Image (tube, rainbow, N blue to C red):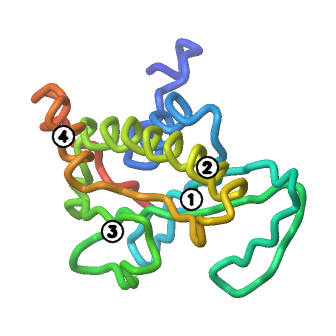
Amino acid sequence: MFEELGQIKMKKENMLTVLEEELDKNLSSYGFAIDWDKSNHVIEVIVQLVASNQLHEKVTDTDGNLSNEEAIEFEDSLLFYHPEKSVFDSEDYLAVFPYEGKKGISRGFLQGFSHYLLEVLEEGQSDLMDFLTDETLETFELKWNKTAFEQVLAKQPDRVLTDYIPYPSY
């Protein structure tokens, strides 16, 4: 009936669409990508920091590659996974989060996630600049504080914590 009236039906929300909407809203100053691996039932969020390496400091990445480029790019990933179906190594991710099968995850969780991820990236950007200018710092990594994240979630209204967004259908 809607098509007959010349209107277009709205696409149903799912974890991917809401996650992208929240990240677009909150991470406009940072690079990010979302990768959905249907066969492994995971959604990966890849974030990127870029910092100027004006002193051309030599930096070695986790794979042992040496760089002294003018711009240093740093990437890290976070993972949403199905507790009974997904296979992954949690050590490969900054943080991992289970979702509830087809039911998905709450809107409030995704909102809190994107807000806290912004805090992590802002602090990370500052830490990366310090790393590139302070010779006493030997390593750089993003830090996800589970307690701080839980405090962000606790500030979400109850209604958004019970409003579940379904896992995308194939």
Q: Which amino acid, by three-letter code, is at mark 2?
A: Phe
At 47% from the left and 70% from the top, the residue drawn is: 38
User: Are dots 1 and 4 in contact, CB under 8 Å?
Assistant: no
Contact (Cβ within 8 Å) of mark 3 with mark 4 = no
The amino acid type found where label 1 is placed reads Ile
Q: Is residue 130 left or right of residue 100?
A: right
> Camera-side residue: 58 or 165?
58
Q: Residue at x 15, y 25 (%)?
A: 157
Instruction: Give whichever of discs 1 and 2 has the lower sequence position.
Output: 2
Left or right of residue 50: residue 121: left
Of labels 3 and 4, the one closer to you: 4
Give how far across and how far down residue 21 sits, in percent. Answer: 49, 34
Q: CA distance from mark 3 to mark 4?
A: 22 Å
* Label 2 packing within 10 angstroms: few (<14), some (14-19), many (20+): some
What residue is at 23 percent from the left and 43 percent from the top?
Answer: 106
Q: Which residue is mark 2?
A: 32
Ranked by sequence position, the earlier of labels 3 and 4 is: 3
The foreground one among 105 and 156 is 156
Does residue 39 lie above or below 21 as drawn? below
Disc 3 target residue: 81
Compare marks 1 and 4 and give the one earlier in the sequence. Answer: 1
Residue drawn at (39%, 35%), measured in percent from left and top?
115
Mark 4 or mark 2, which is nearer to you?
4
Mark 4 is on which residue type? Gln
In which quadrant is the C terminus drawn?
bottom left
Do residues under tags 1 and 2 come within 8 Å of each other at their CB atoms?
yes
Q: Which residue is mark 1?
A: 46
Judging from the image, what secondary structure is the residue with disc 1 in?
Answer: strand
Q: Which residue is mark 4?
A: 151
